[in-house]
Image (cartoon, coloured by chain):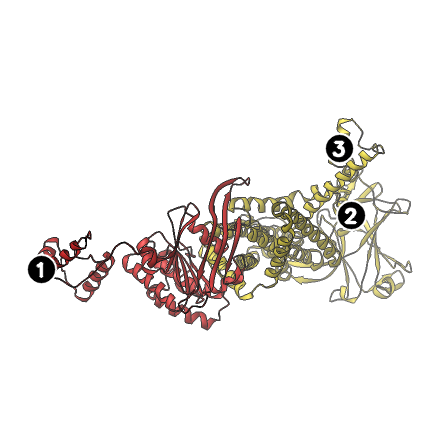
Chain colours: A red, B yellow
Amino acid sequence: MSTNGSPREAVIEIRNLSKIYRDFWGRKKVRALNALSLDVYRGEVFGLLGPNGSGKTTTLKLLLGLLFPTEGEIRILGQPASDVRKNERIGYLPEESYLYKFLNADETLDFYGRLFNMSAAQRRERTEKLLNDVKITHARKRQLREYSKGMTRRIGLAQALINDPDLVLLDEPTSGLDPQGNRDMKDLILNLKSQGKTILMCSHLLPDVQDVCDRIAILDGGELKLLGRVDELLKSQNQTQVISTQLSPAAVAEVEAVLRKHGAEFTVDHPTVDLEKLFLQTIREAKERPGRRLVTEENVQKSAT
Amino acid sequence: MDFNPTSFEIAPALVGWLVVFGSCVLIVCAATLFGMLVSRGVSGPSIWGSELAGTVHDIVAMSPRRVWALTGLTFREAARRKLVYVGLVFLLLFMFAGWFLSGSDLPGEFQVKQYVSVVLTAITWLVPLMVLLLSCWGIPEDIRLRSMHTVVTKPVHRSEIVLGRMLGYGLVGTVVIATVAVVGYFWIGRMLPPSAKAHLTCRRPVFGKLSFLDREGNAVEKGINTGDVWEFRSYIEGATKARALWTFDGVNESMLDSDGNLILESRFLAFRSYKGDMQRSLYFQFALVNPETGLRYADPKFKTVNEFRSRTDTYPRQLKDGEETRDLLKDLVTSKGQLTVEVACIDPNQYIGMARPDLFIRTPDAPFRLGYFKAILCSEMVMLLVVFLGVATSTFAKGPVSTWLTSVTIVVGLTARDFMGGLVRDPEVMKKLALYAGQQEAAQQGGGVFESIYRILTHMNPVTPLPEGPGYAAMQAVDNAILGFLWLVYQIIPNFDSLHHAITFLAEGFDVPWDSAVLPSIALTAGFFLPCLLLGHFALRVRELESK
């Protein structure tokens, strides 16, 4: 149900999906997916998690029609997964950027734009916008074989968005990116969500999933083990957290006394900053104030006291 | 010329193509329907039906823009790979190996034959070799590197991928052929000595129908066999009533040269039953005959047989026949345009050998560049055929296997097609085999697989008819079914005769005729296009593109 009470539209519907890989002689080799059923709703960021070999990438490839299901049914935007027409409204970023290395960025986006029957003017406009969004403009004329991994991921994302899709499928989107690139990718995902797009992402980088996903599914051994909203799943029901501005030692002692009186077990400490935030802040400050500024353990201890 | 040029007829060829194509489609549909029934049970036929409808829709709903995008991608990929440039350099170097041909003291027409053969052979076989490697590896590499994933996850039909690849590699091959053809044309012109340049022309022959009279003057199908296994040519005996008769159709003023002369070009062989005067060639005589009225003009001048070289004889419009003057077109050519040319051997107990193409009316020559262009067009057709086959096989096989499969198909088409035709008793091949004494008969003996096994085990003679009985009838029915299948396989192997002929025509100094060389080449390539496209589409559609 959506927040206004109306039934939510399922963009992806998976029912009893199974996939068995067979050898050349048709003998069963491995059951990669076993009776998976789930829905992905319009406008949400859905995370598909699991350890290696859990079936996340298999699920994604079944959705894209790169593999055929052994059993079960998939519908995407109301059409079967095998229907090519559904691809008009989806974008796909593969795990590795399987792009044509002999093309440059302009040619790459132009080529994929043509595959959507976009006119030359549309392709030009989208190419300019996407190259700016993914910050590749400076290298647009270089062949992709000369790109770094981060740049390749970004151009891969650009081609996934060339048709302004309603549904975006991302396979390990933050894999191989530096922290800044990682942040940019997550911001982009949240930006897409704010535009009403639906995103399905596979990842095993849990902090990234936690930052952006609304709902997650955890797979293991090809089976669905957990499904639900991130905020509800991660809430620890039997603990209470209080965060306050800096308290004096006397105030801290009073708080501890109250808690002891109620028989609570507790710890009082300074909250820690997210390492990603610290990293990004340091880089930002270094750009704003050039010149060496060395922060050592000693400096930190001195500033604490 | 050592082959008999025949006109290509579009209607029977189209019917033949429809039969073969339709049979293959029916077999594939039946096999897939059966497979669906086995794997999916009662829901199999409906799934099969929807897949079939989807396939038809995919083929019909192809987008030209997407196909062109994939064509451009393929072209760029090939152009940015070094293989094309390496191949081009290698090709040009190979052509210049003909530098060793220069300084030859052969007669002019043989020098022309050498240079033209080197250039055309290099173009015709090295360019397809290059595109073979490109086309057989393109899609498999795409699948292996997973770059195909970013394409099929767009609204792209499988047929568009196949067609885009075909057009892309075809374009690459065309550019290479065009480049090498232009270089080759100027190279031939520059390398030929001035004495040979006069032979750099395209003769335009008009061939007639050949028949014979035996030594008693009776009409027979063939002349005498003087002991040659290859019965392409047969002989007439000298100083008898034996004659070789060529009947030409459509003889009119346009066949005369600018001076109003009829030019006959001939190349006969001589067979001496005794040595005779070795300093002199054998004599023969021409006679021009009106086949309706029987009016004859016998050329009073005897001609000599120029073995292995052609000779031309000119007949003016007004022929002096004793006291009278005959108008060639009005008196000797019928109202329907028929003219018969009779050849008689003069020397007693000597023989002159001929085949249908050994005498023709030589109409005004075409410029060499026209024939060269047509021969290049035939080479282009071979290149495109290789592309179609290579791309189609690459949709279901990996690069090395696809290369092997395509190469084998081409090699079998070049070297073993007649053998296969003899096995399946193809009428055209049987006609060819009939030129080899005893071959046709031998090909018809022995029956099919199971009949042969039966005959071997029971020591039964190949010519003895089988006994009557249901078992024997069943055996023959199975053999016929196998033969039918082999016939289908035989039809799938491309027939490169028209290409051979195109090179031979030009190398021998003839224009490459549309009806017996160019049109069959175009039809051959066009005939493979749709089946290859469908095969490629079907193969890509049913396979999982996730590389393993």
Residue B37 image position (x, y, % from top left): 64, 47
Do the residues indicated by labels 1 and 3 lie within the same chain of the protein? no
Residue B269 image position (x, y, % from top left): 75, 45
Dot 2 alpha-carbon crowd within 10 angstroms: few under 14, some 14 to 19, many 20 or more? many
Query: What residue did someone put label 2 on?
Result: B354
Left of B238 or right of it: where is B519?
left
Closer to the camera: disc 1 or disc 3? 1
Label for residue A250? Answer: 1
Label for residue B545? Answer: none
Determine the residue positioned at 21% across, 62% down: A281
Q: Secondary structure at mark 2?
A: strand
In the image, farthest residue toward the bottom = A121
Q: Going from the N terminus, do you reach mark 3 or mark 2 first?
A: 2
Q: Secondary structure at mark 1?
A: helix
Query: What residue did someone put label 3 on?
Result: B452
Question: Which amino acid type corresponds to the residue marked 2 in the rendered image?
Answer: Met
Chain bearing tag 2 is B
Question: Which amino acid type corresponds to the residue marked 1 in the rendered image?
Answer: Ala
Is residue A37 or residue B420 the one in the foreground?
A37
Do the residues indicated by labels 3 and 2 lie within the same chain of the protein? yes
Is residue A37 or residue B262 the one in the foreground?
A37
Do the residues indicated by labels 1 and 2 lie within the same chain of the protein? no
Question: Which amino acid type corresponds to the residue marked 3 in the rendered image?
Answer: Ser
Left of B227 or right of it: where is B296?
right
Chain bearing tag 1 is A
Please say if the residues under marks 1 and 3 sit with CB atoms less than 8 Å apart.
Answer: no
Closer to the camera: disc 3 or disc 2? 3
Q: CA distance from mark 3 to mark 2?
A: 39 Å
Q: CA distance from mark 1 to mark 3?
A: 110 Å
